[in-house]
Amino acid sequence: MALATAESLKAQLDIFCISCEDDSVLERMVEQCICHRIQEDDMVCEWMAYNSRNPKPLTMNTLEQFEHEVLNKRNKFKSGLKKEEPYNKTMDINTLQDIIKAEEEEENLLDSYSTPAKGSQKRPLTTPEHPQSKRSAALLASPGLLLSPASFSANATPSQKYNQRGAKGEVVVTFGATQGTRWAGRKNPAAGVQVDFLEGPEDSLHCSYKFMFQRLRDVRNVLAEKIEDLGETVRSHFHIEEFASVSLPAQDSITVSGQICCDSNGKLNAQSVLLEAGPEHGGQQVAVDLSELKEYSLFPGQVVVMEGMNTTGEKLVASKIYEGVPLPFYSSDIKTEADEAAEPLNVLVACGPYTPSDSLTFDPLLDLISVITRDRPDVCLMLGPFVDSRHEQIEKGQVTETFEAIFSRCIESIVDGTRSVGCHLVFVPSQRDVHHPLIYPQPPFTLPHLSKNQSQRITLVPDPCTLLIDGVTFGLTSTDILFHMGAEEISNYYPLYPPAEEVNMDYEKFQSFAQIPLIPDVLIVPSELRYFIKDVLGCVCLNPGRLTKGQVGGTYGRLLLQRSAAPEGGQRRSPCLAAQVVKI
């Protein structure tokens, strides 16, 4: 089923000489076609039947009444027919496959009761991983007969568990003053929502680059510079005279800087901690004894400054770990009182995958589009994966359309479905997007087929990035750093070293494009871990969860922001008024 377009719908209306009040009415009809999965000609026929009883002009009001009285009831009626008449329908590839599968099961049942002929070998008692009969193999030989996963049609088998989910729209996490909060966008969404890169587009990763050619010497230089820069920041902040070598024996207390390492490939624990100094201080590794510390939180790759004793040169008995120096917050040179009077900014945040694991129908995405058209947020932050490399059917190669085509249809449905809302869309790639380069930092998507009007409200950003949205700074990354390291740190977007096995790091680009220049007002960190909203050092950290969790529905997040005027007496006030995590 092809997606409805305004041109084809206008052509169908012209056949019956039906005129629209304006283009917004036509765009609303396109939305209804997408949300209710109706073709253009069926949509016009339904309107003709509805309008014949009481003729009315085609306006936004009459269109809303038509949806309430006809389209919503039509969906309930069709869902009832599916249960009552499973065989009274036209045969297609899905029904043929179901019939063949039933016949194969019947044949296998009969074979189990039959006596094998003489000379025949015994059938093995083990079940093969991917059993396939000759009949089904012949049918599936033609790739054109397989189901297109990007069709968004009812022909694709929907996920039963997702459709039967409960607690839709339930708020599971709240932050700030949510009592009586109106979760809706501004009355005029097109009135100047500015979405820009904090450091400018010329200093941000804006195109793909060549990778898979990285010398160990270059990686070493990047890590050494990180140790030197962060160590110097702590030294000047706490007025430390100088750092000692980590491997030279000393009878007095010394202060050293270096990077936390693990003495094996396992997880870091209190007995496996090593400290690796920078090249200026020998570049040696020494074991660290943490028994005298009351509390600490360490992870591999963390740059620390320690104070302790190293009498043998082989083990440092740490007595103190200096805290890191927090980065500054963003402050605009232009400070006006109009920021206080402006309406709050409503931002919706969703992270893929946008399909259940047992089906390639994009039902969760269509439900999210319905939420967007209902709440009308000002900005929608859409993080990947959009075409998930971990999806069962993609891993088994059971799709016949290219991954790029699936992605294009997914983006088109989001753009067309939110056209009447007018919200600004921000698309962030993911390491799990099967059609996109698997490298970190990850370049932004390319959408060459977008029209000029569509591209004006779409921003394509890399992973990671720092954005400035109406004076509020956002840190965005779709890489699950929380799941990889199990701790939080605001210094760069991926402080873990060595990185997780599934993260392919380009350290030269990492040094240029993955640093956090300042503490963002809002940090978006999607993770497989449980959703949360927390205030860390004045930064609101949001893990919205994923839109689907396996075969069931997941969650999305929403924020209400208002940039404050110039702080009085240097007291900063967070622009986040309220935030929630909601079940889809």
Image (spheres, grey):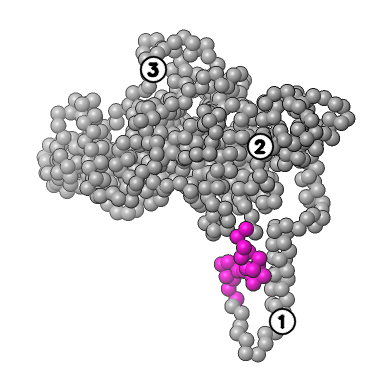
Q: Amino acid at mark 1?
A: Ser
**293 left or right of 183?**
left
Name the one closer to the observer, 157 or 461.
461
Find the magenta span and give its range.
125-144
Earlier in the chain: of badge 2 and badge 1, it is 2
What residue is at 44 percent from the left and 35 percent from the top? 461
Q: Mark 2 sits on what residue?
A: 5
For residue 2: magenta? no
Q: Nearer the viewer, mark 2 or mark 1?
A: 2
Crowding at mark 3 (Cα within 10 Å: few <14, some 14-19, many 20+): few
The image quadrant that residue 294 belongs to is top left
Specify the amino acid type for callout 3.
Ser
For label 1, the residue is 114
| 3 vs 2, front mark | 2
Question: What amino acid is at disc 2?
Answer: Thr
- Residue 440 in percent (x, y) is at 38, 43
Q: CA distance from mark 3 to mark 1?
A: 82 Å
Tell me which numbered mark, 3 or 2, is placed earlier along the sequence: 2
Whole-percent x and y of residue 512?
Answer: 31, 36
